Image (tube, rainbow, N blue to C red):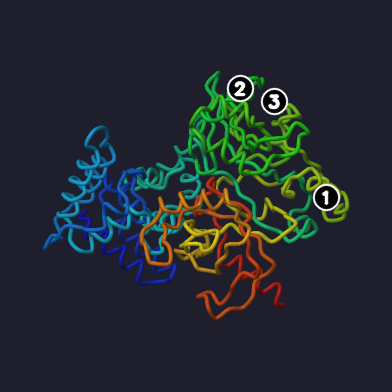
């Protein structure tokens, strides 16, 4: 398959906002690919390079060679060249990487260069999120969408499922199962305005503390333990105390879901930034562990000694969890029969807040573990309005903030693809946060206008706000009122950000 065909599909995706049209376009492109090309084509259509990190940044692509007059570059040839570029290291690496990049781009036509540049910088603005590629893949392979989604969640990779599905057909989906040692996308919680609303939706439920930590998924087989984040990154070497704690449990094989967080001696959580700093640092872990030791708090078990528990109910899974994980290593919870026992749940939520935690998560007792999905079976309740938004750009500060990137341009995720700006804020940023975000955002810069930088939409930030108001200034017709930064969320991916539909629902609720 010519890379030009993928570039043409990318252009078609960018030209329409129709979800149906996007899915049809993706399906046609995948159906036209050879099975050997399927994984690469699926990744490109989702706006990603399979290599993820190539060492190629904005400066390397500022001046491109003249484009090729005619299309000849094959998809797999481009993939092999990116692989070579990603593997460059050692003395002279920068010059060699530059030579390989120029050689690749010289073989590409204008549209192909645009595609390759967007993939390298993570700024392919074509409006095709991974979820749309999954839908297109199901259509191309004439496979049930629910089965394709489940396979992707269990494998953690749409390209890998695409390669199997398009070469072997729908029967290939049966072999995608939970494997101890391979992370799955975690089940996620939707939001509820208060505990009463959550209980009305959930019915008989467990009300659990919502901890201010880092979501971790821990896999154990014998003495081998691996720890993954919610974005499926392996952080085992950074969290030795979590590894040691899980090795003490009376089980041969385990897959646990929970949180890792730094606690004060009195058991209250330390600031989230301390937990994030611990889990994000690879340097001198032994010293960091002494300074800010981490504790594990588990709330779910997905596999236990040869038995997969994804389809078991919340009540059944917790019974199995309690049998192998001692109470000090479990998240606090209370079980209520439904809305008529809201007072007990409210008291528990108030106690959770008093202990310094974020709020509660209400979990329907009859629900299975729906890997990778954000449905109504888990509902988070926080005492203030917050949204997880993506930073789209940032302005240079003035006065005492001169020299720091300060005023953040905030975007909500559009389910049809891309992000929709909802406003700006510089409020709530401490000096430490300003320093951190200046470095992090410059690393993601794709344009450098005089006022600041436009960045790859990757960094998630938690924003508190007083409400949503109508605004003709922004494309969604809405803006956040009195927005302020709560914290950066480097542990979350842009795909986990809140949607513009969720913001619109808040606006309509307040208006009605």
Q: CA distance from mark 2 to mark 3?
A: 15 Å
* Depth order, front residue of 396/37: 396
Residue linked to disc 2: 244
Query: From where the camera sits, is residue 314 visible?
Result: yes
Residue 39 position (above or below residue 478): above
Residue linked to disc 3: 324
* Depth order, front residue of 41/178: 41
Residue 248: percent from the left, percent from the top?
Answer: 65, 19
Q: CA distance from mark 2 to mark 1?
A: 33 Å
Residue 217 position (above or below residue 109): above
Q: Residue at x 50, y 45 (%)?
A: 153
Q: Quadrant of residue 219?
A: top right
Residue 132: percent from the left, percent from the top?
Answer: 44, 59
Q: Secondary structure at mark 1?
A: helix
Mark sitting earlier along the chain (2/1) = 2
Q: Residue furthest left?
A: 69
């Amino acid at each position: 398959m010519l890379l030009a065909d993928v570039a043409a599909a990318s252009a078609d995706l960018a030209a329409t906002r129709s979800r149906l049209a996007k899915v049809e376009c993706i399906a046609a492109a995948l159906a036209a690919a050879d099975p050997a090309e399927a994984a690469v084509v699926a990744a490109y259509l989702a706006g990603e390079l399979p290599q993820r990190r190539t060492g190629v940044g904005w400066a390397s692509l500022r001046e491109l060679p003249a484009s090729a007059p005619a299309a000849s570059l094959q998809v797999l040839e481009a993939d092999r060249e990116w692989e070579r570029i990603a593997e460059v290291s050692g003395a002279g690496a920068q010059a060699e990487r530059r030579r390989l990049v120029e050689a690749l781009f010289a073989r590409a036509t204008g549209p192909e260069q645009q595609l390759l540049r967007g993939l390298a910088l993570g700024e392919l603005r074509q409006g095709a999120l991974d979820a749309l590629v999954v839908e297109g893949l199901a259509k191309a392979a004439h496979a049930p969408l629910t089965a394709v989604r489940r396979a992707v969640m269990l494998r953690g990779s749409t390209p890998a499922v695409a390669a199997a599905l398009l070469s072997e057909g729908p029967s290939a989906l049966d072999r995608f199962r939970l494997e101890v040692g391979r992370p799955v996308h975690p089940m996620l919680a939707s939001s509820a305005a208060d505990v009463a609303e959550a209980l009305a939706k959930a019915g008989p439920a467990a009300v659990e503390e919502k901890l201010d930590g880092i979501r971790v998924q821990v896999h154990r087989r014998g003495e081998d333990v691996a720890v993954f984040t919610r974005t499926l990154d392996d952080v085992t070497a950074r969290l030795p105390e979590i590894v040691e704690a899980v090795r003490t449990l009376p089980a041969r094989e385990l897959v646990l879901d929970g949180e890792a967080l730094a606690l004060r001696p009195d058991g209250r959580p330390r600031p989230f930034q301390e937990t994030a700093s611990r889990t994000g640092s690879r340097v001198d872990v032994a010293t960091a562990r002494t300074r800010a030791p981490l504790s594990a708090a588990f709330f779910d078990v997905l596999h236990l000694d040869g038995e997969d528990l994804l389809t078991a109910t919340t009540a059944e899974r917790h019974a199995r969890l309690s049998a192998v994980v001692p109470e000090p290593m479990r998240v606090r919870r209370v079980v209520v029969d439904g809305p008529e026992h809201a007072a007990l749940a409210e008291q528990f939520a108030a106690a959770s807040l008093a202990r310094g935690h974020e709020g509660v998560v209400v979990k329907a007792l009859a629900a299975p573990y729906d890997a990778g999905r954000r449905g109504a079976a888990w509902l988070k309740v926080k005492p203030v309005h917050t949204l997880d938004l993506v930073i789209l750009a940032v302005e240079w500060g003035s006065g005492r903030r001169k020299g720091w990137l300060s005023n953040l341009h905030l975007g909500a995720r559009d389910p049809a693809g891309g992000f929709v700006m909802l406003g700006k804020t510089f409020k709530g940023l401490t000096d430490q946060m300003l320093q951190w975000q200046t470095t992090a955002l410059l690393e993601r810069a794709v344009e450098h206008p005089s006022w600041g930088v436009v960045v790859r939409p990757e960094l998630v930030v938690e924003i508190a706000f007083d409400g949503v108001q109508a605004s003709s200034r922004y494309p969604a017709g809405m803006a956040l009122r009195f927005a302020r930064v709560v914290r950066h969320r480097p542990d979350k991916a842009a795909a986990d950000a809140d949607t513009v539909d969720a913001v619109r629902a808040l606006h309509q609720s307040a208006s009605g």
